[in-house]
Image (spheres, grey):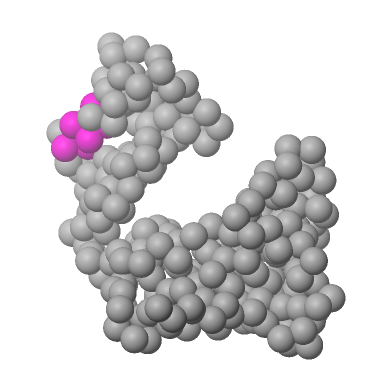
Amino acid sequence: MTTRRRWKPRWSEPCPCASGKKFKDCCWPRLPDFDIGKAYTAAMKNRHLDRALLATRADVTQYTIWHKTNTAPALAAGAVGLRLLRIDVNALNAYVGHLSWLYFRLGLWEEWPAVLDRLRNNIQHQLWYRKIVYHKAFYHVGPGGDREKARQELAKAGPITKNEEDVELLRLYVDLQSDDLPFAARIEMLDRILELDDDRETVLQYQGAKAVQYFMIGDAQTAEQQLNDVISMVQLTTADQPLKGYEKHIYCRLCSYWEVLGVTSRY
């Protein structure tokens, strides 16, 4: 039986975490191995954001090493399919999401596009390249951003259709392009998001958005039914799972639409 060779960056090569430093001067002494994520969680619990940044960089490097040691050679040999690749893409993307938040909170946001460019080759596949496109487009959506630049970046992901499988790209596409789409296409995109993600916050936001779309074209009956379904779902779940943060905000907005529709007796 052959032993798979463990991939590891050379000492003098750029670190896979995309800090811009050499591997020997960056993540090498902090690699978490199977304790991946633990140092980040501890640092966040104690609100040590600088430590959390170092830990997250090490997590990105660790997962990249695992991917290049295991999944990448197996894919090249045709031994595994896209399912395993998607696991790696989604897992590494979660760590990059932590990285993005920390760069923003630590005042490093202007460096983020260059970091994303360096992260591009951590997984050499179109699925990962599209994740990088998502993050680069999202960079332009925030406060002081440029939505036209965000649209230009998002276009680099290629066509986004009702069959899209990347829910993050789909959400951003709806946010940026919805006003330019025909009504039927908007509803198809919203339905696809709900198909891919049944988290309560997602249902609140996007089924609520469907209700608004129907209301805007004058179909009050369908709008009322959409609102009825989503508000009933909330009422059935809040005993075990109280509304939190952004969910409360969305729910209040939906209730205001009930009032506009004249269905005030429900409350």
**Of the pair 159 and 195, the residue shown nearer to us:** 195
Residue 107's image quarter? bottom right
Magenta highlight range? 222-228
- Say which residue appears at 40% left-offset and 62% top-offset: 87
**Of the pair 236 and 210, the residue shown nearer to us:** 236
- Say which residue appears at 47% left-offset and 25% top-offset: 243
The answer to whether residue 105 is seen in the rendering is no
Chief secondary structure of the magenta portion: helix
Residue 237's image quarter? top left
**Of the pair 16 and 250, the residue shown nearer to us:** 16
* Furthest-front residue in this view: 1
Q: Is residue 111 above or below residue 102?
A: below
Residue 109 drawn at (x, y percent): 73, 65
Residue 254 drawn at (x, y percent): 38, 31
Is 63 colored magenta in this rendering? no
Mark count: 0
Is 227 colored magenta in this rendering? yes
- Say which residue appears at 37% left-offset and 59% top-offset: 167
